Image (cartoon, rainbow, N blue to C red):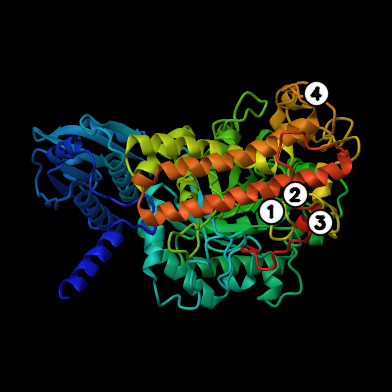
Amino acid sequence: MKRFPLLLLLLLQALLASSENGYELWLRYNKVEDKTLLQVYRQQLTGLLISGNSPTMDIVRKELQTGLHGLLDHSIPLHTSPQAGTLIAGTPQNEPLLRNTAINEQLKNAGNEGFVITTSLINNKPCTIISANTDIGVLYGTFHLLRLLQTQQSITKLNIVSAPRLRLRMLNHWDNLNRTVERGYAGFSIWNWHTLPDYIDPRYIDYARANASIGINGTVLTNVNANATMLTKPYLEKAKALANAFRPYGIRVFLTARFSAPMEIGGLKTADPLDPAVKQWWQQKAKEIYQYIPDFGGFLVKANSEGQPGPQDYHRTHADGANMLADAVAPFKGIVIWRAFVYSHTNPLDRHTQAFDEFTPLDGQFRKNVMLQVKNGPIDFMPREPFHPLFGAMPNTPLMMEFQVTQEYLGQATNLVYLAPLFKEVLESNTGNDYTVAQVIDGSTSKDTLTGIAGVANIGNDINWCGHPFAQANWYALGRLAWDHSLSSAGIANEWLRMTFTNNQHFVDTAQAMMLASRDVYVQFTNPLGLHHIMGTGHHYGPAPWVNDQHRPEWNPVYYHKADSIGIGFNRTTTGSNALAQYQPKARQQWENLSTCPDAYLLWFHHVPWDYKMRSGRSLWNELCYQYYTGAARTAAMQQTWNKLQPYVDQQRFHEVAMLLNIQHKESVWWRNACLLYFQTVSHLPIPAGYEQPSTSLEYYKSLRFPYAPGI
């Protein structure tokens, strides 16, 4: 009887040891699994010499002590002078040992945020050195060295010089003041506005640490559908508290500005950007914000889009509105990020064309501290869409990329969809001017000093931050590509898997292949062949290609697929909306001819007959059926793949992913059946023999309702 409690305790301990909840993200610092490599690391890293007493250098010291203790499984002593195996971290300003060496020459290429990691002799002692021009650069270098250890790389002869390719590397939180998150699928907002500014949740620090580990240096705290209350004194005090917590990690706070704020909280009768009283109000508001947050980054603005107020309400241009705000923050070295996501239900033209038409005439008219934030594609974060034509059309305006990390149109938090291939597909697209989208946004083509990438965050207060365990990889990928867009999707997945799960090669190879295919699988069972925007309205969950009752025409899926008895697809050639004319000739050549347009974009640019013969030899209708059925089958294969990896994964996360993959497979069948049953009603063609016929009617799928779907 006495042994029973002990056995129960041991069993409980064993269960806890085999479970992880995902809170640590990719910063787990578990003991290095390879015993031979572990011994090498221990010989190479015998102590720490860390100079500087700033809050950032205190973080460097703590991170190295914590990380090395976990990875090497023993404490690392602090040295006061270099010995064989000492890890030295600092800047030439705070560590004399790093002056007058070859490192200084390398630091010229590191900039303000980059770092140098070398294996060098210091006082004739072999040492590993992390050096930078600034303390934050040392912190970035610290995380990079720890990443090498986590992924079991050699650190014997290091000679690394790394600097970010982009100045602004940001997360955009679509978080509301009531803690709901628009398009959020991982719980409520992590910002507890009610307890701020006096209560600093440790999660805020962990958030900043995770971002710093991948080089993210900016955060927009609030929804682009802005609330003017955020600019009032009580909420500026709350924002100040967060800014103070983030500052040592190199993260600057930005806020969304509601254009009508002078009227809503300022008592003015107008928000006209050319009105002197409005200009003065924003100037005073900017001065007030900088008194609270001296390093405030600036404003992100959504204006005259989807009902948001803006300068066009007063017959002014987007440049008029952006410049008015830019002048207000310019004395404090702040910037304005003006979103180019604009479209109007009163505009009868193709939604694809509207942003281009509105902004290209304004090229060169924006202040030097204004950036245009452009979504990766011309519609709205679709599972696959061509790059936005603005990236090849505004050489005199800094353009910032906006990706969506949260999976609004990509299965939300129930689907495993790794987004680095989507990001890379866009970044590597040739604009038609002999340079890529990546070269546009990193300033290579224009020498812009304002450069950046923003990602709409997928972070909530779920214990694992992102809802789906694999959704963490998209946050990670955004940061890594913002630092260096030349990194590969495979390389980023490899890093993330090793740091988040295990370095076991079989696991990494198998899971990496599944991740790399996952986005293509999702496109295949939801929006194949260039279909787009056929999801449920409002919540955007699941298929609804039949919807045609929304009061705004461009919110109806039928607007986009245009399926009829003849065929399916949106004609954007010269005989249709001519949206293709907005691309440079070399870019549009790949899409304008029906016979040469890649299958991936066929129905995006062309209305194609149902009996059109595809490259596969199948008719368009049969190809559509093939894509939907193949995509659903591939989700079943993902389940089988994951089940075989159970021996390599802790039980908690294994079962979480297994359950979610089961949901994903069910949803893939839902998409397949609902879409094909609907398209049958206009094509009047049968689903080919040999495919499992839908067992549920179209009317059943049409009847489904999701009044409490997350993210609305």
- Whether pointer 4 and pointer 3 mark residues with C-beta atoms closer than 8 Å, the reply is no
Q: Position of residue 367 (x, y in %)?
A: 63, 48
The amino acid beneath tag 1 is Gly
Q: Residue at x 41, y 65 (%)?
A: 204
Q: How far apart are marks 4 and 3 (CA)?
A: 31 Å
- Nearest the viewer among 555 and 453 is 555
Numbered disc in front, either 2 or 1: 2
Local crowd size for mark 1, using a 10 Å CA cut-off: few (<14), some (14–19), many (≥20) = many
Dot 1 corresponds to which residue? Answer: 542
Q: How far apart are marks 2 and 4 (CA)?
A: 24 Å
- Image quarter where the C terminus lies is bottom right
Task: Please determine whether, in this image, residue 108 is positioned above or below residue 178.
Answer: above
Q: Where is residue 35 in the image (x, y as percent from the top left)?
A: 18, 39
Local crowd size for mark 4, using a 10 Å CA cut-off: few (<14), some (14–19), many (≥20) = some
Dot 4 corresponds to which residue? Answer: 613
Dot 2 corresponds to which residue? Answer: 674
Local crowd size for mark 2, using a 10 Å CA cut-off: few (<14), some (14–19), many (≥20) = many
Badge count: 4
Local crowd size for mark 3, using a 10 Å CA cut-off: few (<14), some (14–19), many (≥20) = few
Q: Can residue 492 be seen in this view?
A: no
The amino acid beneath tag 4 is Lys
The amino acid beneath tag 2 is Ala
